[in-house]
Amino acid sequence: MKVVLQRVSRASVTVDGQITGHIDEGLMLLVGIAVGDTERDVAYMADKCLNLRVFNDEQGRMNRSLLDTGGAILAVSQFTLLGETRKGRRPSYIQAAPPEQAQTLYNLFVENLRQKGVKVACGVFGAMMQVELVNDGPVTLIIESKNGEKL
């Protein structure tokens, strides 16, 4: 599982001209589910995203987590994060989980986040989406679960 995490002052996702998700201050999460990912990966990634200290404290140091700040999350499924580009000029997506498995694990990821009391807005799984955000900092991190090995 791979997540691109961005600290944002606001973010939104639009599908077919309709805003399906919008947040103010918080985290934008682009979520890629890989072949072999499990519920263990989902739990690890949800915990990591919620507790990573990427928000400033009173001294201006990144020392506070999303749970500390009360911010929200915009989570968007994005299989292209698993694109392999080392060979040729056309990305290969063989490392991306099949849609049925990916959707199940993505939904579980969102539910894990919500269970911690966080407001989570979403895109539409499998849809063509337009994502807008204002990256605050900018702060952008790539987080990988390595199939739960770090648990």
Image: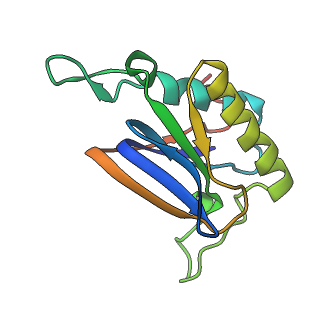
Q: Which residue is painted at 61% across and 39% down in the image? A: 146
Q: Residue furthest left?
A: 59
Q: Is residue 141 visible to us here? A: yes
Query: Is 91 on the left or on the right of 139, as rendered?
Result: right
The structure residue drawn at horizontal position 68% and vertical position 35%, both measured from the top left corner, is 109
Which quadrant holds the C terminus? top right
Q: Quarter of the image containing the N terminus?
A: top right
> What residue sits 83% from the left and 48% below the top?
101
State the residue in front, 83 or 125: 125
- Across and down, in percent, residue 59 comes to 14, 18
Vertical relation: 56 (above or below) 134: above
**Location of residue 9 (image quadrant):** top left
Q: Residue furthest right?
A: 100
Where does residue 116 sit, x and y in percent of width and height? 61, 18
Q: Nearer the viewer, residue 90 or 99?
A: 99
Q: Position of residue 11 (x, y in %)?
A: 43, 49
Q: Residue at x 42, y 25 (%)?
A: 52
Is residue 60 positioned above or below 32 on the image?
above
Q: For residue 7, which quarter of the picture?
A: top left
Q: What's the coloring here?
A: rainbow
